[in-house]
Amino acid sequence: MTTGNGNPFVFHVALSEKSKGILKAQHRKAALAGTGNKFISSLRQVHDRLRTDPKDFGEPLYRLPALRLTVFQAVVAPLVVIYGVHEEKSLVLVQTFKILSS
């Protein structure tokens, strides 16, 4: 997706301190299990997709009309991300991350 002048259209991705803490804890667990590199690779893919095409990346779960958000869920193994996309602004709000159980 591009803007009118040919520059790529980029969404701002916002994470709460709670979400950042969850990610750090999950990364520590993955590193201890020997899957830290896979975790980081998945996280990079998630971040790239949230910045460039969040509406096509995940499956819509529900809409929050008062906040003008649609909430989505997406998976890039081993990560699951739940996030909202604002309907008028180029803003993605990450709700949480989960790890797929094996």
Image: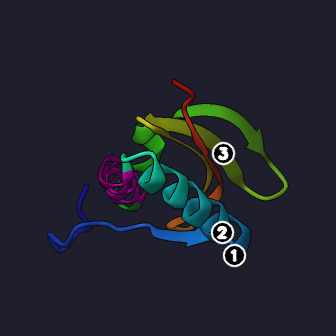
**Label 2 residue SS:** helix
What residue type is disc 2 on? Answer: Gly
User: Looking at the image, what colour scheme do you see?
Assistant: rainbow
CB within 8 Å, label 2 to label 1: yes
Lower sequence index among marks 3 and 2: 2
Nearer to us: label 2 or label 1: 2
Crowdedness of circle 3 by 10 Å Cα count: few (<14), some, many (20+)?
some
Residue for point 14% across, 69% down: 6
Residue hosting label 2? 21
Any part of residue 58 in sight: yes
Q: Which of 62/30 is in front?
A: 30
Crowdedness of circle 2 by 10 Å Cα count: few (<14), some, many (20+)?
few
Any part of residue 88 in sight: no
Q: Position of residue 3 (x, y in %)?
A: 26, 67
- Predominant secondary structure, magenta span: helix
Residue for point 69% across, 75% down: 17
**Label 1 residue SS:** helix
Q: Which residues are magenta?
A: 36-50
Within the magenta stretch, is there residue 7?
A: no
Lower sequence index among marks 1 and 3: 1
Crowdedness of circle 1 by 10 Å Cα count: few (<14), some, many (20+)?
few
- How far is disc 1 from disc 3 in space, using C-alphas? 21 Å
Label disc, if present, on residue 70 of the rendered structure: 3
- How far is disc 3 from disc 2 in space, using C-alphas? 24 Å
Q: Which of 95/79 is in front?
A: 79
Nearer to us: label 1 or label 3: 1
What residue type is disc 3 on? Answer: Thr
Residue hosting label 1? 17
